[in-house]
Amino acid sequence: MNSVFIIAEAGVNHNGSLGLAKQLIEIAAKAGADAVKFQTFQANTLVSKKAQKAEYQKQTTDAQESQYDMIKKLELTEAMHIELINHCKHHQIEFLSTPFDNNSIDLLNKLGMNTFKIPSGEITNLPYLRHIGELQKHIILSTGMADLGEVEDALDILVASGTPLENITVLHATTEYPCPIQEVNLRAMQTIKQAFGVKVGYSDHTQGIEIPIAAVAMGATIIEKHFTLDRNMEGPDHKASLEPAELQAMVDAIRNIEKALGDGKKKPTSSEAKNKPVARKSLVAAKTIKVGEILNSDNVCIKRPGNGINPMRWDEVMGTKAIKNYNEDDLI
């Protein structure tokens, strides 16, 4: 199978610091993630100055601060983007960023992005979807807060704008931070795959690492997970993020699951072959048998080792004559 593409979501956990953003890149690369993802936006085109924060944001940042003021401090300039892209190249990890407005789409396109991540909040933004679809790049579409009809509408717009369906991967997601386990609904990922014939993945907002691991076992081709340097830092997303050791553990577990999934063919493995004679059984003399005696259930039994006549041939052997003498426990 193809390797699961693991996106370490730095998001805005850099807190506006270029140095911290670089540290996050280094952590993601060391953990073995395939990509590290940030967010590209301009506060004045993303959010109204009157917009309220989400409840989880009020709990993790200054509750009196507006969403606009919070977002404004987390912008990345074009120069910062270039520096981060170069830092990713140095550490051999792919740079990704989610654009939240048309200008940000154009900036990332200018900077050479080949994959565009559409966040859940933009799945109903027709002009935005059309703008990205026209670029004909690879697209990762998150579907938090969406029903199946809204997913279908977004896919139709992207395809009609010029992006082939095979270039789109749809991520199931639940937009709550942290996401309650009972609201994960991993089976919805498989529903999306069956409904639209697309590659699917999972964007995880739960606490811990077991849910993304389960998603891989269920067929996710992309896993996205927030991470941070320290969950106790101030900022909207730190509390629902993995710390470095947890990110490493998640990546390692996913790579092990990939190996364990195998090719789906049911056949003995190379390591099993040596155990066949030990674990399986054969037809064995239950007691002394003289040549010419009739073999039956009184004088023949089934015991290990398994390098004699297969017990599946029991009916074939019963009622035949012994062609030699047997002592107890001799293979027939």
Image: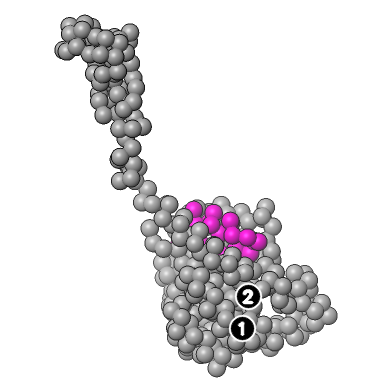
16 left or right, relative to 159: right
- Give yes or no for contact between labels 2 and 1 (Cβ–Cβ under 8 Å): yes
- In the image, farthest residue toward the top: 293
State which tag comes first along the sequence, 2 or 1.
1
Q: Which residue is drawn at 54% across and 75% down?
A: 27
Q: Quadrant of the C terminus?
A: top left
Q: Give the residue number, with chain letter if any, for mark 1.
A: 20
Q: Residue at x 59, y 65 (%)?
A: 246
Q: Residue at x 57, y 73 (%)?
A: 9
* Percent x, y of residue 48: 73, 83
Tell me the element at label 2.
loop
Is 261 drawn above or below residue 284 in the view shown? below
What type is the residue that disc 2 sits on?
Leu
Taking the spot 59% from the left edge, 76% from the top edge, the residue there is 10
Vertical placement of residue 300 versus 194, above or below: above
Name above or below for residue 320 compared with residue 213: above
Q: Which residue has dot 2 on it? A: 229
| Mark 2 surroundings: few (<14), some (14-19) or many (≥20) residues within 10 A | many
Identify the secondary structure beneath mark 1. Answer: helix
Dividing the picture into quadrants, the one containing residue 286 is top left
Q: Among all residues in the image, which is located at the extreme left?
A: 323
- CA separation in Å, label 2 and label 1: 8 Å
> How was the colour assigned to the protein in this rendering?
one colour
Magenta-drawn stretch contains 212: yes
When the figure is inspected, residue 74 is found, relative to residue 3, above or below; the finding is: below
Q: Which quadrant of the figure contains the N terminus?
A: bottom left
Q: Badge 1: how crowded within 10 Å, few (<14), some, or many (20+)?
A: some
Amino acid marked by disc 1:
Leu
The stretch in magenta equals 199-217
Residue ranking furthest to the front: 327
71 falls in the magenta region: no
Residue 18 in the figure: left or right of residue 216: right
